[in-house]
Image: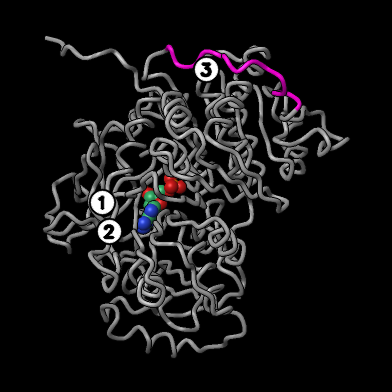
Amino acid sequence: MPGLMQDWPLTLDRILEHARRWHGGREVVTRLNDGPITRSTYSTIYDRAKQLSHALAEHGIAREDRVATLAFNSARHLEAWYGIMGIGAVCHTLNPRLPIEQLVYIVNHAADRLILADAICVPLLRQILPRCHSVERVVLLAEEAQMPTDLAADAYERWIAGRPTDAVWGDFSEETAAGLCYTSGTTGEPKGVLYSHRSNYLHGLTTLMPDVLDISGRDVVLAIVPMFHANAWGLAFAVPAVGAKFVLPGAKLDGASVFELMESEGVTFSAGVPTVWQGLMQHLETHRVRPTTLKCIVSGGSACPEALMRAYQDKYGIEVRHGWGMTEMSPIGTLNVPPDLATPAVKQGRVLCGIDMKLTDDDGRPVPHDGHSFGHLWVRGASVARAYYRRETENILDAAGYFDTGDIATIDATGILQITDRAKDVIKSGGEWISSIDIENAAVAHPKAALAAVIGVPDAKWGERPLLIVQLKPGESATAQEFLEFLEGRIARWWMPTAVRFVEAIPLGGTGKIDKKLLRAGMPAS
Ligand code: AMP
């Protein structure tokens, strides 16, 4: 027997409609890529997103058509998301930091009809467009005066100006595709994750819970995580849903720029990858300054070093929440809230309501939740992918509907998950697994270390042994012995790296994570 409740599809346009009606005057602040601050409101963003929908429809964009964005976080980019998704088209976020070959592959694979891009991405567009044959038009998220003369493109401001604000949004099933985001493709071709309105809506609401992001209408949220990185961790839906002030920082994410924006806008909450938090910490320490309004940061995307969490919590009183997730999960899977400021949330936390997870051994047998036993991590739920875009016939789930995350983890008796490695990064020594993440965390706590990475190297006796690679802080010098002594007592004895190598810069991938594939290939030279 069906329930007797109203038919109210969970489509994302309703979130911005809600923000416009009940938080219409709340500010959305952007620092443009070239520096200036611009101010908008949810009400204005709504109207302009509708104007964009009108322009898209006039161009012939219909439901299911892919429209790409190649842009950093800004109010215009937010308008683009809602303007595209509102009419049932698919918003495909392109990461400007990806290698050219991957970008070309992704645009062609998705058959994007339009690209809405930041002006600073013009050099990139010049390189990819001649090989992207599905693209009919490029619109630069800019004023007419900023348009380059050597690229055939429309200016966004001119394109939407004077158009009606009454485009029809929604009016389709909540299962309709809304967004498309390709995985980084570190193994094989990038794969497209196709979010639905329903999956993003539910994920956005779930992340607002107190033990997840705990964002409220009183917050000022700085979204450092880019809108092209794993669905912006759901912030573009969660933040307007509660009417929090939204601060969008553009491309400048160095410590000084982040700090300045936090102070000038009164930011209370922010989310980003550990490298950004490392950069901000260096700025705070070098310039002896303190954030005055910031209360909480969320770190995710790769393991957050304990030393960094301690520094934020002990010295600055800023709570560090530690999240784990992946593009295929919309993306948040677990979140760890520290019980108090004296206790860092080193592990990745408890699974969100609406997601189910399990740990298995290599043969698919359950692994105990004892906090020690490593296993393959599997997930299922309403915000987890069931297939990749245009690879729908490939089965990516097990018989019970679980998706293999490719991560190796432990779960303790209280249900708290700890990621020990990517399955492909795990080091197997004498038949036992060594966690590269644990060694990295211990090594980066050395006062001279800026970044640390651990990879497995072949070993005649043990099969594989850990190699520690260290990027020192500017101006520092150190010996291998210094680091090995520092690790003593901090990690199990048999995990001790066989060698330490110092490098100028540890390579980072397009989303700010350490690129272990490059490191394994012998890059960069020491
Ligand atoms: P992506 O889809 O690019 O967001 O990458 C997802 C992968 O990043 C996960 O499968 C993990 O391997 C890794 N990851 C994300 N968050 C964390 C975290 N907090 N600690 C360790 N690894 C993480």
Amino acid residing under circle 3: Ile
Quarter of the image containing the C terminus?
Answer: bottom right
Q: Is residue 100 above or below residue 344?
A: above
Task: Between residue 234 and residue 294, name the one nearer to us.
Answer: 294
Decide if residue 405 is on the left or right side of residue 235: left
Contact between marks 2 and 1 (CB within 8 A): the answer is yes
Residue where numbered disc 3 is placed: 87
Q: Tally the marks.
A: 3
* Image point (61%, 27%), residue name: 48
Decide if residue 260 is on the left or right side of residue 483: right
Quarter of the image containing the N terminus?
Answer: top left
Secondary structure type for disc 2: loop
Alpha carbon separation for disc pair 2 and 1:
6 Å
Amino acid residing under circle 2: Val
Task: Between residue 21 and residue 220, name the one nearer to us.
Answer: 21
Q: Is residue 481 above or below residue 494?
A: below
Alpha carbon separation for disc pair 3 and 1:
33 Å
Residue where numbered disc 2 is placed: 337
Check the image and tell me how it is coloured. Answer: one colour
Residue 241 falls in image quadrant: top left
* Image point (36%, 47%), residue name: 215
Report whether the residue tagged 1 is closer than 8 Å to ligand 1: no
Residue stretch in magenta: 158-171
* Image point (60%, 18%), residue name: 165
Secondary structure type for disc 1: loop
Q: Please say whether residue 244 is visible from this viewpoint.
A: yes
Does label 2 or label 1 sit earlier along the sequence?
Answer: 1
Q: Is residue 161 magenta?
A: yes
Outermost residue on the top side: it is 1
What secondary structure is the stretch in magenta mostly built from? loop
Residue 380 falls in image quadrant: top left
Residue where numbered disc 1 is placed: 211
